[in-house]
């Protein structure tokens, strides 16, 4: 009887070995699932929190930041140092220096949450590597947004005809304090600049972004695609 | 071309050829192993050095060569240095008698099978010496394991080989292959069940089981997963190789693959018809070499496949498998073969012709 049991156990053990080998064989024929990192990268999910960045206004091509300093005050680690200047012809201050100490930042998001003009957001930049500590202790966000502004200006050459709608929009401008006096509207949005600006002044900044992004698809694609944290 | 047939030149060519074959195999089987492991785990494996990682063995080899071989104080210097040589030499010797094709064999001995097994068992001693000379507790544990494992698995392996020997009646490897001509149904693995050329039941109806026993013992003898008790990197650091660095370790590593090649070659010769074509046509000459290598590499790939499928067994299970299952089973096949071969004689003795 015990011999029978031994034979049965041996056979069932052998069968389980074959089952295991079938599983590995099947896995080996399936496509690869790893991402070859330096060659391929993953698309970051919408809620991914990289270091904060300044948001470019897709209509004006400039930083939305008004240098109010709320973020610097909200930061629990005190890692934000910023300065604003009042440029000629502007109704508001604009950012001139934004120094983020990323070595202290805990990515809590208080700055993003508190920002009144919706000018801060988490970047999707996870590929932050440097041999130099200074690159992180003084992360120059202004330099980044400046580069973005210049890139925007190159892709949105200011046409001469824009002058006419710009003057017609002038009376509306005081209603919308966040808007510069001469908005460099992209040609696609040139026909409907006034309602867009009005809507923006009336509703919350997050909703405004949703309304304006179809008007300026090129600039909107530069924005993070993810939903805004409330 | 006539000078190629001169005996000294011929021997030199074979020597270089076998060394190159073993070295190339060891280098590229490591790559195949890593690639295979990658595929099974659904990642590409090494793919940066050269096209699809084909230069990876070169990089690995150069890295190992560039490292210093440290002989730790307290070790037995002579044995410590001798062990890698002793582990590498037997597979080289064994391959000298393996017929890769009908006429492609360095030395066709009429006791080829005995020769292979006598040299094959030196491997154990080399690992034991390496572990002993290291004066390292992990290495000594590993050495003790290797000895008991090899003793346990040498028995069923030899019993199984005796079974095959009783069928073939010769130890000449080339002769064994020649008997398995004309199609895969005449290979020993199937000829044992039914002798197609003679048209009656074969000498050992359990021949496929015999092949499985041989293959299992071959895995255990070459210290391959799931029987890799000699290295057991998760328990014994690196087992017998713990104290070896640089190319000393590299040689042990190469020897493992060389032993796998020898084992798979032997399995091909004994059970799968060596250089015989499976369909009867396209045999002879270079075709023979192709068939032989195809069968051997299929077995080697199976070995790799097995390694990345099964976890390492526990040591007592390993010994249980041998003493409680494989040895009784191989004794049964041995007995069965003896009875089957002598059955006609027995019949005649009892009932008269």
Image (cartoon, coloured by chain):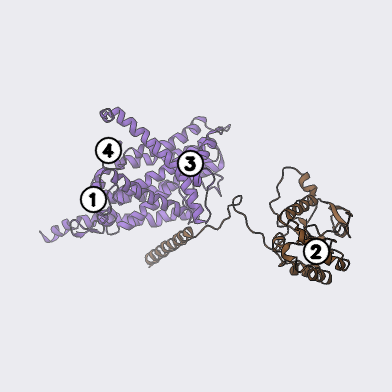
Give me the C-alpha separation between circle 3 and circle 1: 36 Å
Left or right side of B224 for B264: left
Q: Are marks 3 and 1 on the same chain?
A: yes
Q: Quadrant of the N terminus of chain B?
A: top left
Q: Which is nearer the eye, A44 or B175?
A: A44
Q: Nearer the viewer, mark 2 or mark 1?
A: 2
Residue where numbered disc 4 is placed: B109
Q: Chain of mark 2?
A: A
Left or right side of A17 for B282: left
| Colour of chain B as rendered | purple
The residue sitting at 64% across, 59% down in the picture is: A43
Q: Secondary structure at mark 1?
A: loop
Give me the C-alpha separation between circle 2 and circle 3: 80 Å
Q: Are marks 3 and 4 on the same chain?
A: yes
Q: Residues within 10 Å of mark 1 (few under 14, many from 20)?
A: many
The disc placed on residue B181 is 1
| Colour of chain A as rendered | brown
Left or right side of A110 for A11: left
- Up-down relation of residue B150 to residue B78 (above or below): below
Q: Nearer the viewer, mark 4 or mark 1?
A: 1
Compare marks 4 and 1 and give the one earlier in the sequence: 4
Residue where numbered disc 3 is placed: B253
The residue sitting at 72% across, 45% down in the picture is: A130
Compare marks 3 and 1 and give the one earlier in the sequence: 1
Q: Are marks 2 and 4 on the same chain?
A: no
Q: Are marks 2 and 3 on the same chain?
A: no
Point out residue A97 in the picture as x, y percentages from the top left corner: 84, 51
Q: Quadrant of the C terminus of chain B?
A: bottom left
Give me the C-alpha separation between circle 2 and circle 1: 95 Å
Residue where numbered disc 2 is placed: A164
Q: Nearer the viewer, mark 3 or mark 1?
A: 1
Give me the C-alpha separation between circle 3 and circle 4: 29 Å
């Amino acid at each position: 009887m015990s011999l029978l049991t031994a034979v049965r156990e041996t056979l069932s053990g052998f069968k389980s070995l074959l089952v295991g080998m079938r599983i590995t064989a099947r896995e080996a024929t399936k496509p690869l699932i790893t991402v070859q990192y330096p060659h391929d990268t993953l698309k970051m999910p919408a809620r991914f929190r990289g270091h904060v960045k300044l948001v470019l206004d897709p209509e004006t091509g400039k930083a939305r930041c008004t240098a109010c300093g709320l973020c610097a005050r909200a930061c629990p680690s005190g890692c934000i140092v910023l300065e604003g200047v009042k440029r000629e012809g502007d109704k508001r201050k604009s950012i001139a220096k934004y120094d983020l100490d990323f070595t202290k930042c805990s990515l809590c998001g208080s700055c993003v949450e508190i920002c009144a003009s919706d000018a801060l957001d988490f970047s999707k930049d996870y590929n932050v590597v440097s041999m130099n500590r200074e690159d992180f202790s003084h992360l120059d966000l202004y330099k980044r947004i400046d580069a973005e502004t210049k890139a925007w200006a190159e892709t949105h050459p200011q046409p001469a005809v824009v002058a006419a709608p710009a003057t017609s929009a002038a009376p509306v401008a005081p209603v919308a304090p966040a808007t510069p006096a001469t908005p460099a509207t992209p040609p696609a949005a040139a026909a409907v600049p006034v309602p867009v600006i009005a809507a923006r002044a009336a509703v919350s900044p997050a909703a405004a972004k949703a309304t304006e992004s179809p008007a300026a698809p090129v600039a909107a694609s530069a924005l993070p695609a993810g939903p805004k944290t409330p | 071309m006539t000078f190629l047939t001169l005996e000294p030149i011929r021997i030199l060519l074979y020597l270089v050829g076998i060394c190159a074959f073993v070295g190339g195999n060891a280098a590229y089987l490591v790559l195949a192993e890593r690639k295979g492991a990658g595929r099974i785990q659904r990642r590409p494996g090494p793919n940066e050095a050269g096209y699809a990682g084909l230069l990876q063995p070169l990089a690995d080899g150069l890295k190992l060569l560039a490292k210093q071989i440290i002989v730790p104080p307290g070790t037995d210097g002579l044995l410590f240095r001798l062990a890698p040589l002793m582990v590498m030499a037997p597979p080289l010797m064994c391959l000298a008698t393996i017929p890769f094709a009908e006429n492609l064999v360095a030395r066709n001995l009429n006791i080829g099978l005995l020769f292979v097994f006598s040299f094959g068992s030196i491997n154990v001693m080399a690992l034991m010496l390496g572990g002993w000379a290291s004066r390292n507790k992990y290495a000594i544990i590993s050495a003790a394991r290797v000895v008991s494992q090899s003793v346990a698995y040498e028995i069923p392996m030899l019993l199984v080989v005796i079974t095959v020997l009783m069928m073939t009646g010769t130890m000449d490897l080339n002769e064994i292959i020649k008997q398995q001509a004309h199609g895969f149904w005449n290979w020993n693995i199937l000829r044992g069940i039914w002798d197609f050329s003679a048209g009656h039941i074969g000498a050992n109806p359990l021949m496929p089981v015999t092949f499985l026993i041989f293959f299992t013992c071959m895995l255990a003898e070459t210290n391959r997963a799931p029987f890799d008790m000699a290295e057991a990197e998760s328990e014994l650091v690196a087992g017998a190789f713990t104290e070896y660095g640089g190319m000393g370790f590299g040689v042990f590593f190469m020897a493992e693959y060389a032993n796998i090649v020898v084992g798979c070659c032997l399995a091909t010769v004994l059970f799968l018809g060596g250089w015989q074509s499976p369909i009867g046509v396209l045999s002879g000459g270079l075709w023979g070499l192709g068939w032989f290598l195809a069968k051997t590499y299929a077995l080697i790939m199976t070995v790799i496949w097995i390694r990345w499928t099964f976890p390492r067994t526990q040591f007592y299970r390993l010994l249980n498998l041998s003493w409680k299952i494989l040895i009784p089973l191989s004794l049964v096949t041995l007995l069965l073969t003896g009875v089957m071969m002598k059955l006609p004689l027995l019949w005649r003795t009892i009932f008269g012709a």
